Amino acid sequence: MTIDPTDVARYLLLGAHAPDAALAARIDALRTAALRVIRPARTWRRGDLADWRARSATLALRLAGCHAVYLACGTLGAGFDALARRTAATSAADALILQAVGAAAIEAWMDETEDEIRRGLAPGETLVRRYSPGYGDLPLAAQRDLLGFLDAPRTVGVSLTDTLLMVPSKSVSALIGVRKGSA
């Protein structure tokens, strides 16, 4: 897994500004620390397209023209959360940078997950952009069914708190439509 420093800077909301030397050094150090503890995992399965379309008008729009849907979950693992807690106890600035590192890492991991799914598609099939519970009018509570369908607590170690936060915290659940032709 790679964590692109440009993506970290984007999550730090630096815009077009490049990090100065000191910030670039902190980003590099925290990327290195994160890569030592990250244990990425993922799972996915084809799901019932009709069931998911019925849950949300915005998701139905995203899945328009699709004939199948994949449900996916990815995580950086519990080691990242432990590093985040240790970092927060010593430096608020480093904790903020580390959260940006984690955001860049989980997005890169989910991009890799989509690439892996894409390699298994039939000729002429393509994926649409992933869509997660909590976007648009798809309720965050939909994660319960999505993670249950994937048996995510057992397969990748991802569960939900009573308030619907994912544990480990740097985890993503998503639906990815499949259609014929270009996305």
Image: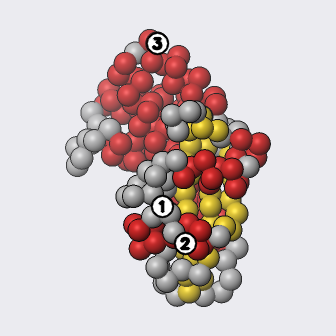
**Numbered label attached to residue 131:** 1
Q: Residue at x 65, y 40 (%)?
A: 158
Secondary structure beneath label 3:
helix
Position of residue 144 measured from the top left corner of the image (x, y, whole percent): 60, 47
* Among the two numbered marks 1 and 2 on one chain, the one whose residue lies closer to the N terminus: 1
Gap between marks 1 and 2 measured at Cα: 9 Å
Position of residue 179 measured from the top left corner of the image (x, y, whole percent): 55, 81
Disc 1 residue crowd, few under 14, some 14–19, many 20+, Cα 10 Å? some
Q: Where does label 2 land, which residue? A: 177
Q: Is residue 2 visible?
A: no
Q: Residue furthest front?
A: 54
Write down the quadrant of residue 49 in the picture: bottom right
* Among the two numbered marks 3 and 1 on one chain, the one whose residue lies closer to the N terminus: 3
Residue 122 vertical placement versus 38 (above, below)? below
Q: Where does label 3 land, which residue? A: 89
Position of residue 79 measured from the top left corner of the image (x, y, whole percent): 63, 29
